[in-house]
Amino acid sequence: MNIIEKAKEVFKIESEAIANLVNNLDTNFEKSIEAILVCKGKLIISGMGKSGIIGRKIAATMASTGTPSFFLHPAEAYHGDLGMIEKDDIVLLISNSGETDEVLKLIPFLREQKNIIIAMSSNPLSTLAKNSTYHLNIYVEKEACPLQLAPTSSTTATLVMGDALAITLMKLRDFKDSDFAQFHPGGSLGRKLLTRVEDVMKKDNLPIVNKDSSIKDIIHTVSKARLGLAIVQDANSTVGIITDGDIRRAMEEFEDTFFKLKAEYLMTKNPKTIQKEAKLIDAQNLMNDYKVNSLLVVDNNKLCGVVQIYDLAL
């Protein structure tokens, strides 16, 4: 058996299943989106087995992209957790066959409470489909499983349909990266979008030299501060910056007179600065734009710290 060829076969079968989902889209998808957009409650997702696992992922995606959502296990719901579903909630029920007993048992309660029911199944004539407000068809021609038993293509199709719902809702809500960060404060994106430069900048014992500082003093200052740079000031006004790269290049270019050089001959004038209230994402963008690893942090044009590319990482 050619292992690589078997893997390629799975990719091919499942990618074709996803591509064919386009043909399953109809007004039920549009109406589902419209209903969720105006919903005053939550989107509650439920399913058994592999459908339930995919449902959990869809709920997590929804919750992190602006649609309040959580997963409810159908068996637990039937044994007391139905109280988690309120009248204003929309319920998304997932069953590939549309005949999963634990899922179907929820329908009488949902209909009595007049919840909107969105169903995902591969059979528009199934019991689930017939008893839903809107039906999303996730039919696939065949599973990637050679026995046609293990849910493979069908779970992939379910996941993609869920992603289509979530991303469409994101765009219609004009959900931005700053909104995303609000729900991910612990992630790298959330940190960069929510954390201010002043929260991470180095502000103590800054490596300050003056325009007349000797190369020996500059090297000593750079080494002591361990920031890879020295800040050149003149009468408390920042006039330049010297990086360890500037020192190495000067050593090669001015080999005979290197130790006679002063700071004003080595420094880069008008160093890049950023306000202390700026967000880390602003600092990252500025560093990328100017291809630098460090920025001087200012407050009302007064030096108050240094932020470096290493400070932006988790």
Image: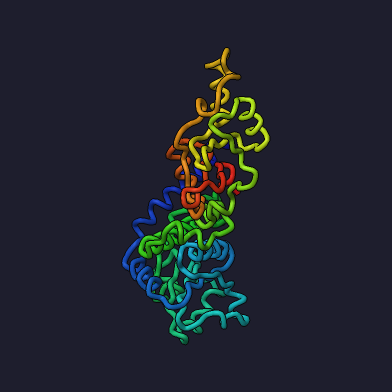
Res 229 seen here: yes
Give the quadrant of residue 127.
Answer: bottom left
Figure label count: 0
Give the quadrant of residue 208.
Answer: top right
* Residue 89, above or below 286: below
**What colour scheme was applied to this rendering of the protein?**
rainbow
- Residue at 51%, 62% in the rendered image: 182
* Residue 202, above or below 82: above
Query: Furthest-front residue in view?
Result: 235
Query: Furthest-left residue in view?
Result: 27
Quadrant (top left, top right, bottom left, bottom right) of the N terminus: top right
Pick the front one: 213 or 68: 213
Residue 121, given in percent of the width and then of the height, sits at 45, 66
Residue 89, given in percent of the width and then of the height, sits at 47, 78
Residue 157, given in percent of the width and then of the height, sits at 46, 57
- Residue at 46%, 77% in the rendered image: 41
Residue 27, given in percent of the width and then of the height, sits at 31, 67
Pick the front one: 306 or 213: 213
Res 143 seen here: no
- Residue at 55%, 69% in the rendered image: 71
